[in-house]
Image: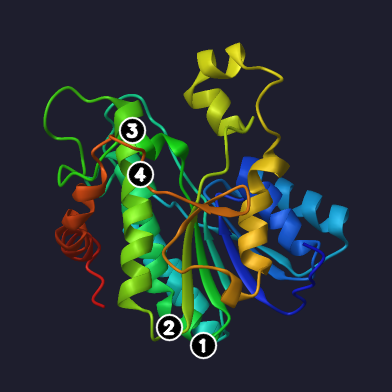
Amino acid sequence: MQARIDGKNCIVTGANSGIGYATAQGLASRGATVYMVCRNKERGEAALSKIQSATGNQNVHLEVCDLSSVADIKALASRFSSKDEPLHVLVNNAGLLESNRVTTSEGFEFNFAVNVLGTYSMTESLLPLLEKAAPDARVVTVSSGGMYTAPLTKDLQFSDGNFNGLEQYARNKRVQVALTEKWAEMYKNKGIGFYAMHPGWAETPGVNRSLPDFSKSLSGKLRSMEQGADTVIWLALQPKEKLVSGAFYFDRAEVPKHLMLAGTSGSHALIDSIVDNLRSLSAISS
């Protein structure tokens, strides 16, 4: 964890608070050039100046982007592409747990738009820049232990049955883990490592907002956002030969993707049709 990554380019989504903020600060403190992708300009600017003064690293930049919008993500990717610089680390951290069914301006269910379609679109759009950083490039996706409760389903936008935000979040997080596995297989010859991780239950603004009762009942017992970000930073710093592309990590170790008897493992067979669906919804050809 003492490794320096001076001059390496890192993108962290949802970087103005919580685990994303702690990740951006941790990478900046090790010399990286960090691009913080945030939806809100004011909050993003405040987080940016805090990180710059805490780390002394002026190579920290803000990119304003609504991660629920495929159009916004593509515009961001094209701004980066015009720099024509390698991207060494992409951290897909931005996440959402919206309890009610909300539809984005592009017509997608809100949780799905950020957690799944946003993660997919961001990663696929930036692949050419990740390839430029090969063999050192890596993509780290922040999932959740909640995914253990949910198998993969083709009902990506929770159109069947009564909408349940918590269940949709768990389903979304399962897709992220299966996608990571699929990307590792699809792009194994491109010199990019793909890793998903579970940060543990950390005391972040997102958890407080989405799960107020849970947050209150465990006040003082949850992890700090720095503890939540620890494995993300560890995955960004490790020599790649020590990591398993496509794996799921928790507390700096590879862990199983399925619980005994949970009946989720067979569901990963659906990932090919899910990827086809995401490809057509995002209109990104790969």
- Which residue corresponds to mark 4? 258
Q: Nearer the viewer, mark 2 or mark 3?
A: 3
Quadrant of the drawing holding the C terminus: bottom left
Q: Earlier in the sequence, mark 4 or mark 1?
A: 1
Q: Residue at x 26, y 48 (%)?
A: 265
Q: CA distance from mark 2 to mark 4?
A: 32 Å
Element type at mark 1: helix
- Which residue corresponds to mark 3? 149
Q: Nearer the viewer, mark 4 or mark 3?
A: 4
Q: CA distance from mark 4 to mark 3?
A: 9 Å
Q: Nearer the viewer, mark 2 or mark 4?
A: 4
Q: Earlier in the sequence, mark 2 or mark 4?
A: 2
Q: How is the image coloured?
A: rainbow
Q: Amino acid at mark 2?
A: Pro
Query: Can residue 110 be spotted in the picture?
Result: no
- Marks 1/2 in contact by CB < 8 Å: the verdict is yes
Q: Nearer the viewer, mark 1 or mark 3?
A: 3
Q: Amino acid at mark 1?
A: Lys
Q: Amino acid at mark 4?
A: His
- Which residue corresponds to mark 2? 128
Q: Earlier in the sequence, mark 2 or mark 3?
A: 2
- Which residue corresponds to mark 1? 132
Element type at mark 4: loop
Q: CA distance from mark 1 to mark 2?
A: 7 Å
